[in-house]
Each structure stands twice: as C-alpha cells, then as structure tokens.
Amino acid sequence: MIDTFSANSLKVLDKSLDEFINKYEYHLSIFKKDKRAVLGSKYHSLICQYLKGYDITKMKLELSDSNVFDKFLKSINRDNFIKTEYPFLIKCELNNIPYYLTGRYDAIYHDKGFIIYDWKTLNIPQDVENDLQTIVYLYTLSLIFKTQDIKMRYISIEKSEYKDVEYKNSNYYKKRIDEIIGKYYNSF
C-alpha cells in the first residue's frame, strides 16, 4: 500500500486509479525524458544557483538560447528568497490512516507573506487555482510555516509571464487531497 503522495502522483490518481497503481505500485510506466524536460532541469538548476548568488555565466553556455533565460533572470529580484529547491514531507491522515504529502518547492520568497515560486519552462497550468500542485503546495506550506499568508506564483521562463494564486483555506485543500487519496484507499 502506498502512503506517500506527490502532486504529480495525485494528478495520475485523480485521472485513473488503474494508471496510478500500474505506475506507482507496479512501476509499469515507460519513462521517456524529452528535450523539454532536460531543458527544464537545466533552467531549474541555473535559477537555483543564481538565487544563491553564484556566478552562472559559464553554466548558461549549456543553453542553446541564453537570451530568453537572461530576460527571465532580469525579472527576478534575488532579495528575500529564503529557500530554493526546498523539499517537504508532511504527515496527514484520512480516516485514521496516515499518509504523507511530499514534493519540492522551486523557491520560497518572503516579504509581507510567503510566495511559493514554481518555474515552468513554457506553459503555466490553465486552471492554476484548482491544479493539484497548487493545492498540495499551498496546503503543505501553510502547515510548515503555520500561516495562511501565502500565495503561489507560476512563472513561464520562455513566455515571460506569470500567474498568482492566493491561499483559500486549509479545509478546501485537505478535502480535495483526501477525496483523491480516498479513491486509492477505498479500492482495497
């Protein structure tokens, strides 16, 4: 029985219980890293190093078009970033059954509240308010920092656009997460 869920695994479970079981219990998925995923990993790594104050001039040479990336970097104020690539593992419970929510925030910023930054290579989710990554990330950060003064900012590196999502309430987030996990737990 699986007891640890990421936003991505919850998306798979919400879509299909069978696909979730095949992928996460039986490990029957075909993993294919495409060029966009590799580029996204490079962007994430460079942004993390940049926010930590390192000179990334030579590292940017790995990019085929560093002009897009340079334009993106100019839009980021390095002040007040408190964590980059910050992992989390939060214990929760559904009907007296413990489970864990896990993931990694791309960056956390603090100035008059917390902002979770999530870098997207190209496209920002269409329905950011109801995206499971938004729900899991806002909910877990509210538990970690014991505040509801949080928002999430999705930023498209290549399109130079962003969308913000304000924190709703923990009951809404927990109910949505439990509804999805319940699909799996109720299948036994």
Image (cartoon, rainbow, N blue to C red):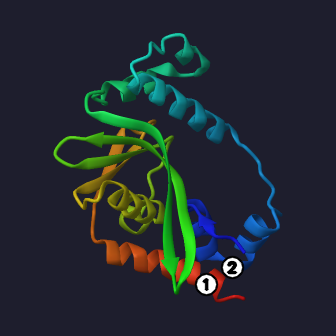
- Percent position (x, y) of residue 170? 33, 72
- Percent position (x, y) of residue 121? 51, 40
Q: Which residue is mark 2?
A: 17
Of pointers 1 and 2, the one earlier in the residue sequence: 2
Asked whether the viewer can see residue 175, the reply is yes
For label 2, count other residues whose C-alpha is less than 10 Å away and answer few (under 14), some (14-19) or many (20+).
Answer: some
Secondary element type, mark 1 = helix
- Quarter assignment of residue 17: bottom right
- Percent position (x, y) of residue 115? 29, 47
Secondary element type, mark 2 = helix
The numbered mark at residue 132 is: none
Query: Would you say 151 lies left or right of 65 here?
Result: left
- Residue at point 64% right, 70% down? 3
Asked whether the viewer can see residue 127, the reply is no
Q: For the residues labelled 1 and 2, say whether their Cβ atoms are less than 8 Å apart.
A: yes
Query: Would you say 108 lies left or right of 57 here?
Result: left
- Percent position (x, y) of residue 88? 49, 52
In the image, is residue 122 above or below residue 102? above
The numbered mark at residue 183 is: 1
- Quarter assignment of residue 167: bottom left
